[in-house]
Image (spheres, rainbow, N blue to C red):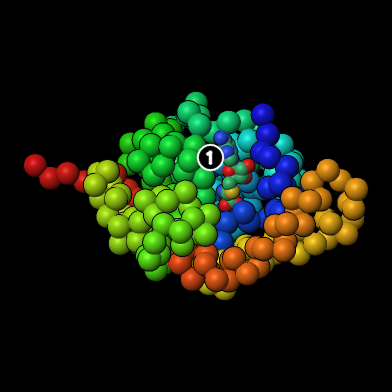
Amino acid sequence: MDLPRIFTIRESGHRIHNPLTPEKFAVLGEALRLPPGTRVLDLASGSGEMLCTWARDLGFTGTGVDISTLFTEQARARAEELGVADRVDFVHGDAAGHVAQEPVDLAACVGATWIGGGVPGTVELLERSLRPGGLMLVGEPYWRRTPPDEETAKACHATSLADFLPLHGLVGRFGELGYDVVEMVLADQDSWDRYSAAQWLAMRRWLDRNPDDEMVAEVRAELDTEPVRYTRYSREFLGWGGLRAHEALTTC
Ligand code: SAH
């Protein structure tokens, strides 16, 4: 059970595997307005940057679960480096269906809603780990501009136009699921570049260092096409947001 190798070739140098910068992650953490001691479950925690920096800066504690052995090792090393290894731990495993043993204050899935089969299923999954009145945090792409046709959507690495909604549609979806969206921090084109363009350098360096690897043809082909594809399509059409949601208060 592991992430396909192409992902770790592209992103082994990334601390954050989504289009938020360290600054935006810090803004998102502050915007949560949660006290020290807040308990977090982070599903698909990647290299653990969110949990580790929030543990250091905000005093949160928590657990991250990720299917990548490399990213999970990097997360543990980062926790040591930032001096928070006593407050956070990282588990290698499949986050699909993962429910916390003790209910948490904040349940997050930032950039991996396929683990619940989409946003509604992920909201349902996170809900199962949340204490009553807890918060959830979901990171998800949206259409910054709606692509004119299916071909353009596919060029943004979507399987179809229906994969994503415009931002107001994504925000509205939480309302339909019985949640109030109470905060959001969005990627922008520059922060997308930090995520995507950094992959090109990682691939180029990997090719320089591994000329005889069996993955060379695949990585070479990707580096030949990605920069133009990204700047022409994803950078124009795709947005990304971290949305914080509370279960809606019902008045009756
Ligand atoms: N939340 C992290 C990582 C987002 S990238 C961050 O923002 O940096 C998506 C992550 O999902 C990767 O780390 C990948 O290893 C992980 N992943 C993919 N499928 C998974 C699964 N079924 N269970 C757990 N993690 C998964």
Residue type marked 1: Leu
Please indicate, yes or no, whether residue 165 appears anywhere in the rendered image: yes
Residue to which mark 1 is pinned = 43
List the single residue furthest toward the top: 101
Secondary element type, mark 1:
strand
Residue depicted at x 90% and y 48%: 212
Closer to the camera, 151 or 223? 151
Closer to the camera, 234 or 121? 234
Q: Quadrant of ligand 1?
A: top right
Residue 179, relative to residue 98: is it above or below?
A: below
Closer to the camera, 143 or 30? 143
Relative image position of residue 123 (x, y in whole percent): 38, 40
Relative image position of residue 192 (x, y in whole percent): 57, 66
Q: Would you say 116 lies left or right of 15 here?
A: left
Q: Would you say 57 lies left or right of 116 here?
A: right
Please rate how many residues cluster around mark 1, counting C-alpha atoms within 10 Å: few if below 14, some from 14 to 19, many from 20: many
- Quadrant containing the N terminus in the rendered view: top right
Residue depicted at x 65% and y 68%: 227
Relative image position of residue 95 (x, y in whole percent): 54, 33
Relative image position of residue 18 (x, y in whole percent): 57, 56
Q: Would you say 77 lies left or right of 140 here?
A: right
Please indicate, yes or no, whether residue 127 appears anywhere in the rendered image: no
Q: Would you say 80 lies left or right of 127 here?
A: right
Residue depicted at x 39% and y 54%: 161
Number of numbered discs overlaid on the protein picture = 1
- Quarter of image, res 252: top left
Residue depicted at x 39% and y 61%: 149
Closer to the camera, 54 or 166? 166
List the single residue furthest toward the bottom: 190
Beta carbon of the mark 1 residue lies under 8 A of ligand 1: yes
